[in-house]
Amino acid sequence: MATMVDVAQRAGVSTATVSHVLNDTRPVRPATRQAVLEAMDALGYTPNTLARSLVTSRTRSIGLAVSAISNPYFTEILQGVEAGALEHGYGLLIADPHDDPEHERKVVQLLHERRVDGMIVAPSADPDELLAYLGKHDVPTVFLDRLVDTPTDTPAGIPAESPADDSSGALHGTSFRFDQVCAENAEPMAQLVTHLAELGHKRIGLVAGLPGLSTTTERISGYRHGLANAGLPYDERLVAHGDSQSAAAESATHALLSLAAPPSALVTGNNAMTIGALRALRERGLSVPDDLGLCCFDDFAWADLFTPRLTAISQPSKDIGTQAVRLLLERLASPSRPGRTVRLPSTLVHRTSCGCPEDPEKPGAFASPGRPQSTEKGPVS
């Protein structure tokens, strides 16, 4: 097995220079760096990651904590995180917090004890213990998909304002700064509701996600603004929580359809809840869109295979993952900079479950008027 000495001899440099190339501990001239890399490749040299971490205090690993990894949405986020990590020479350690606050804190602690350089986390609906742990131990962290400390009623098309920065950079009583990345939620949901209203629906139901998640809050806000845009009243009886899960969404859909005046159209808050809603409709012998129009948040690979084909909001899941890695690496390079929130545009995939005929319009990106396709806001701490 080739050693660092072998690499140094072949490249015509000192072992210290090889170490600097491997560990980025000192600038090395490009030609010299290339010679070392070519020598490593020729000899089949494999760096000792453990030894390197002792020198640099870095393991070049990232901890990823997301729930429901089997969900296609989070699977695509994982693919984006992995691609971004590998591009920069980082490995991943993955854990599933199961959307349980206590378990969430435990798995994050386990990842931290494995000496990951930083964390990427999709926080639960009650992340106080998580935030306290991350802040206490100054763990560089990026939150993805779900934001922390967002307002409870964000108008459609307007990004959640970041908490004001105070002299200590405090967030939830900690002295740490966090970065966040997510998709647009409110405006796309408002557009779905407005579209259903334009098709003549007066009673539009919502199968909403788990209470406490920023995605749930923002999508409910978008639903309300969509109704307002269409001149329709908000009726709280038409909102049922499916808790972001298929089984709960099935029960929620049954509850909505059992109302004295049931909805004539439904919007579901994520892909898992769409499956639950479709199951409930099948059990009742209802046809989409003849008996009930349906639109959903979250597109998925087989949505185009249903009959009718599902009109859906597609989130840039892989981009969310790669952006999370970018933010984390920038945090590692500059630990004291203000936190930032990055929002990416979601896209309407217009099919036929809403009640529109075949040959739909081309999909279009949702971004707030006058705003770029991705936005960053800061500070968040």
Image (cartoon, grey):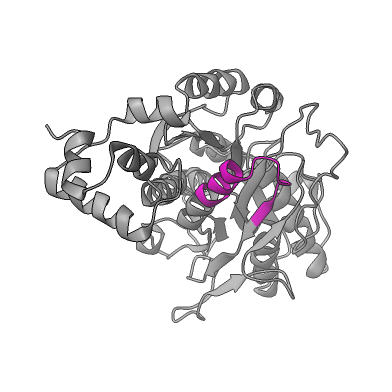
> Foreground: 233 or 254?
233
Which residue shows up at 64% across the image and 39% down it?
255
Residue under the image location 64 percent in, 65 percent down: 192
- Name the residue at 53% across, 34% down: 118
Q: Quadrant of residue 114?
A: top left
Image quadrant in which the N terminus is located: top left
- Say whether residue 2 is left or right of residue 19: left
Is residue 286 visible in the rendered structure shown here?
A: no
Q: Where in the figure is residue 57, as x and y percent of width and height? A: 48, 28
Vertical comparison of 12 with 252: above or below: below
x and y percent of residue 213 in the render?
Answer: 67, 39
Q: Residue 315: percent from the left, percent from the top? A: 53, 58
Residue in the foreground of this view, choosing between 1 and 73: 1
Question: Is-magenta flag for residue 336?
Answer: yes
Taking the spot 48% from the left edge, 58% from the top edge, the residue there is 287
- Left-right relation of 271 to 228: left
Tell me where the magenta segment starts and ends, as one range.
325-342
95 horizontally vs 176: left or right: left
> Compared to 361, does 7 lie above or below?
above
Where does the C terminus fall, quadrant-wise? top right
Q: Is residue 353 magenta?
A: no
Say if 353 sits above or below 240 in the image: below
Which one is nearer the viewer's eye here, 363 or 90? 90
Residue 20 in view here: yes
Q: How many marks?
A: 0
Where in the figure is residue 301, as x and y percent of width and height? 37, 57
